[in-house]
Image (cartoon, helix red, strand yellow):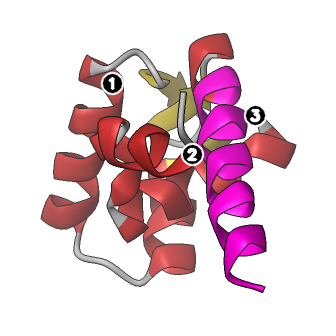
Amino acid sequence: MEPLRELTKNHVLGNPIRLGIVLYLLPRRKALFKELLEVLEVTPGNLDSHLKALEREGYVELYKVFADRPRTAVRITEKGVEETARYLKALKSVLEGIE
């Protein structure tokens, strides 16, 4: 598939906040909701909306962890890892065409 078409086809990662979420999760595999809020500097409602979009597409899983109180955690799925790699490869290909 042509790299530019791959970028536009994969509209879920075309949003900078959603791309930021998966890029943050890639090396860590999981993070707390609060951690993502701090790193991305977005509102809780905004982050929740983007996480739900990624969850609908199967890129992340949301689950609860119990420490001092229940907390929401996010885990990147294998599909999320694969699709992010595919998206970044297509982006790199487009950028190399510019140079």
- Is 40 covered by the magenta stretch? no
In this rendered view, identify the residue nearer to me: 94 or 72. Answer: 94
Q: Compare residues 46 and 88 and report the one nearer the observer.
A: 88
- Tell me how far mark 2 sits from mark 3, CA to CA: 26 Å
Comparing labels 1 and 2, the label whose residue is closer to the camera: 2
x and y percentages locating residue 49 in the rendered image: 16, 49
Which label sits on residue 3? 2
In this view, the residue in front, 34 or 8, is 8
In this view, the mark in front (2 or 3): 2
Cβ–Cβ under 8 Å for marks 1 and 2: no
Residue bounds of the magenta highlight: 81-99
Residue that carries the numbered disc 3 in the rendered image: 29
Question: Does any portion of residue 41 appear in the rendered image?
Answer: yes
Q: Residues within 10 Å of mark 3 (few under 14, many from 20)?
A: some
**Direction from residue 5 to residue 94 in the image, left or right:** right
Q: Tell me which amino acid carries mark 1.
A: Glu
Q: Position of residue 61 (x, y in %)?
A: 46, 20
Amino acid type shown at disc 2: Pro
